[in-house]
Every structure is written in C-alpha cells, then in structure tokens.
Amino acid sequence: MEGTVGVVTQFLDSNIGLVAALGKIALALVIALQVAPIMVWVERRQAAFIQRRIGPNRVGLFGFKLFGLGQPLADTIKLLFKEDFVPKQANKFFYILAPIVTAVIGLVAIQGIPLAKEIVVGGHTINMQPVNLNAGFLYLFAMSALGVYGVALAGWSSNNKYALLGGLRASAQMISYEIAMGLALLPMVFIYGTLDLQTMIAAQSDSLLFGVLPNWGIFLSPISFVIFVITMFAETNRLPFDLAEGEAELVAGFLVEYGSMRWSLFFLGEYAMMFTLSALTTCVFLGGYEIPWLSQTELVALLTPIFSAEPATWVASLIGLTVLLAKTAIFMFLFVQARFTLPRFRYDQLMRVGWVYLLPLALVNVVVLALIVGIMRLT
Amino acid sequence: MQMDLNFIAFVVMGLAATILSGVMITRRWPVSAAMVLIAVMTLLAGMFGLLEAHFAAAAQIIVYAGAIMVVFVFVMMLLNLPPEELRYGGVTWGEMVLISLGVLVAIVLGTQVGQGLLTQGLESMGYAPGQTPAHAKSLYFAADENVKNVAATMFVDYLWAFELVSFLILAAVIGSIVIAKKRSAENANAA
C-alpha cells in the first residue's frame, strides 16, 4: 500500500503539467455540461414568472417536489427515447456533424475562461485557466468564429429550403456581429495593456474614484460594455436577435429538421456558448473571479492563518470560482429576461444595427479610448 | 526533438493535415472539400500553437477558418451545384504534370536536401549555424510574450511592408465594391 501510494505520488509529481491540464479541462467540461440542464430549468421558470404563471414545478427527485428541478432530467430522458431520424436525401454526414460541431465548440470555448487564480498542490503552482495561450481571449474569439459552421452546416444539410435560408442568415448575423464584438474589446486591451484574462482580472482589484467604485472594466469603459453585451446576444442567436431560430418566422430556421438528442445537442452548444461569453464579460468588465476591493493574494494571505498555506489557496480558488459563477449568473439571468421582454428584430433591422450603428460606434469608441489612454500614458 | 507529448501531437497533426489535404482534392461535393479544408486549417493552427506562435494560431482560425472560409462555404451552399455539373472530364495530362511537380517539391522540401537549400543564405543574415528563422535573432520582449513580439516586429522592423499591405487590402475592398455596384447599376438600367 505504501509503495503504491509512493509510486502514484511520484508519477503525479513528475507529470504534474499533464495531470493538472487534464484536471482543469475536466472541471471546465463539468461546468459546461451542467449549464444546459440548469439553464433549461431557469429559462422555463423565469419565463413563467415573467408571464405571470408558475412554470414546471411538479417533477422533483425522490418524492420531493423541489420547485421542479427534476424537469431537465425528465426532459433529457424523454429526448433520449424519441425517434432518431435522418431526413431522406439529406447529406447524412453533415447532418450528423452539425450538432456535434456546435456542442463541441461550446465545450472547447469554455476552456479559455480562468476559473480561479491558482492553486498550490504539493509545491507546484497550478494556474487555474485550462487553456492559457499567449494570445489570451483571442482563443475565445477563434472558437466563436468556428461556431458559425455548426449553424451553416445544419441549415444546408437538412435538404430543406427554410433550413438553408435560416442557417445562412444566422451565419451572416454571427460573422457581422463578431466584428463589433472584437472592436468592443479592443479598448479594454488598451487600458489593461494585455490580452491575458488573468492579468486583466488582477488589474481590476484596485479601486477607482477614491475608493467608491472597484476598478472594473464596466466603469472604465461603459460603452464597450454595452456594445459587447449587445453583440453577445447576437452571437448566440438569442432574442432579440434570434430570427434564425425564431418560431414564427422560419419555422425554427436551421433547426427545423432536427429532433430528439440532436436538437438538444444544439442547445447544449448554445447554452455553453452563452455561458462562455457571459464569463468572458465578467472577466473583462466585472472583475472575474475576484471579490471587489479584495485581490486574490490578499485573500490567500487572510486565509493562511486559518488553514495552512496550501489549503488556503484551494479555499481561495473555491471562493473565486463561486464569485465567477455568481457574476456569470447575472448575465445568464439577463439573457432570459431579454428573451421574454423584447420583440424580435427583423433581419434587415438586425443587419443594420450590426453594420450601421454598432460598428461605427465601436470604431469611435476605439479611437476615443486610444487617445485617452495614450494621453494618460504620456503624462 | 525529444519524444514528448508536444512532438507526438505535432507529428499526428502534421500527418492528419497532409492526409486531409489529399482527401480534400478528391471530394465530389464542393461543400465537403470546403469543410475538409477548414479541418486542415484548424490543424495548421494547432501546429502553429505547438511551435509557440500563439498569435498566428489564433489569427489563422479567426481570419482564415472563421471568416474567409465562411464566405467560401456561403457561396457553395447557395449555389448548391451537384457533382454532375462540375466535372468536365477525366484527369488531363496537364493535371498529371502539375501533381507530379507538387509531389517532387514536397519530397525535396521535406528532406534534408531541401532544408539545406533553404537555409543556405541564413548565415550571412546573422543566424547562428543550425538556427532557422523560427528562432528570432533578437526579440523586443521576453521569449514567451508572443503577441508583443509580433506586434513590435511588425510595427518597428516591417512598418513599411505593413502599411503597403494595408493599401493593397484597401484597393481590393474598393475594387469589390465597384464590381458589385456596377452589376446592380447595369441590372437597374436593363430593368
């Protein structure tokens, strides 16, 4: 027994990079996979409250009603038992591939979110961001750019004119709003001087305005925040930009020929992408996993007398993860609230908002903030 | 070139990219070929990442696989031409010559002969023996700050080239708008 433990510890010690990477990826995957069921329940209950009804409240677990929390489980089991079909004369390979692409891109994109600052295990410091490229949040943009293909392939491979139109319109909408999204985040890169999300989060733990406000990105550049939130809605095809999957316009658009688990794979990918973009918003604009005015290093220093040195980092990371999830939950709530409050944009209005209103506004924002930051750096 | 995970991943990605490129040129449906090309580009981006060129990897996916190929795929999906209308005949002699030339170039470049030919002039440019342009001569920032180094090199060493390329892109954009407008104006006159 002693020898086995020693061998295992030695293996972990020498391959700590690989083991830590796999562990972080697993943690991010678990979070991404749980977003969809929770959001299904949240969406249905919140929609019900907005519409002055109650929503699903009967399906519970183990005999307790539990506010209907068993509803997503019941939905999943029902979807697993539904008939799995491929339409005649549809391109079978791409028909099967499209929901896989959407789901996988959603699960891969979440790997770029910093879940906490770092934990110290056995003398090794492990950075809690699963994918930490030098190109920072450009990784997330790359993944959301690839997410366009899931929608386009779904529309084309369904052998259905409505689906093709819906898919192409959704793809055009997504690539149009990606430009404004990137331009909205560019001033934040000027202000923080880095593409790395964890450096941005660390820079947001000071205070602004003589200690009244935390140094969050939303106070430093509110226009960027507004533009980014609007483009976030458009990127994930959520109301008011959901013409592509709108029920009344195009019969459910690119999803019309998809049923059962393939349909739910699309929604898994969509909810994972919503979560990823909301988490990106909190990291850049709301201070990420840090409690306002209290940086992670101060928190670890506070906790070290209570626990010892290494468990203090674990507890601080747990607190950081909770804070990140709470801030992201604000945006998920906003997504659902906007869905059941605002009417849908018509397609030409949608494209006009993206190209004629948001893009020049984002460009002007970039120029103005570049001037401000440049002058502040020079003086 | 130790046998670690990076090396194995690089070899796997390289082999997959090569095989998929061959698969791409033998597809019947244009959309299938486009999708395989996107897969090849994603693998290339992965290889860039393994070579520590993180900015090039992200830019490859954002720009090439995520914007340019989307436009390709749009056009192909809208035209939706079946394979019967696309094939004009068997493989011609010219195609055979080109394919064999391509194979020859691949063999030469992939072996020591080609590598030696490519690196002939590098010592006069200041590289140590055995160093290739993959290792920069002098970096403006630390070696792991890839984006900062790319930006500094692009805007300090190669500023002229950057500005001239941006003029070229501007000319292309204006040209495409002119072509599109001319067609719609002709349609309006004809109607």
Image (tube, coloured by chain):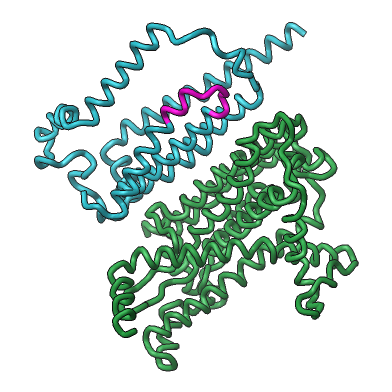
Chain colours: A green, B cyan
- Residue at 47% in and 67% down: A201
x, y percent for residue A344: 79, 46
Quadrant containing the C terminus of chain B is top right
Which residue extends farthest bottom? A306
Magenta highlight on residue B24: yes
Side of B30 relative to A82 (left or right): left
Which range is magenta?
B21-32
Nearest to the observer: residue A117 or residue B8: B8
Question: Which residue occupies the foreground of this view, A169 or B90?
Answer: B90
Question: Which residue is depicted at the point 76% across and 76% down?
Answer: A61
Q: Quadrant of residue A17?
A: bottom left
Which residue sits at x=60%, y=62%?
Answer: A33
Q: Is residue B171 above or below residue A261?
A: above
Q: Is residue B114 above or below residue A273?
A: above
Provide residue A281's location: percent of width, then percent of height. Answer: 57, 60
Depth order, front residue of A319/B7:
B7
**Does residue B42 appear anywhere in the picture?**
yes
Asked if A154 appears above or below A267 in the picture, the reply is above
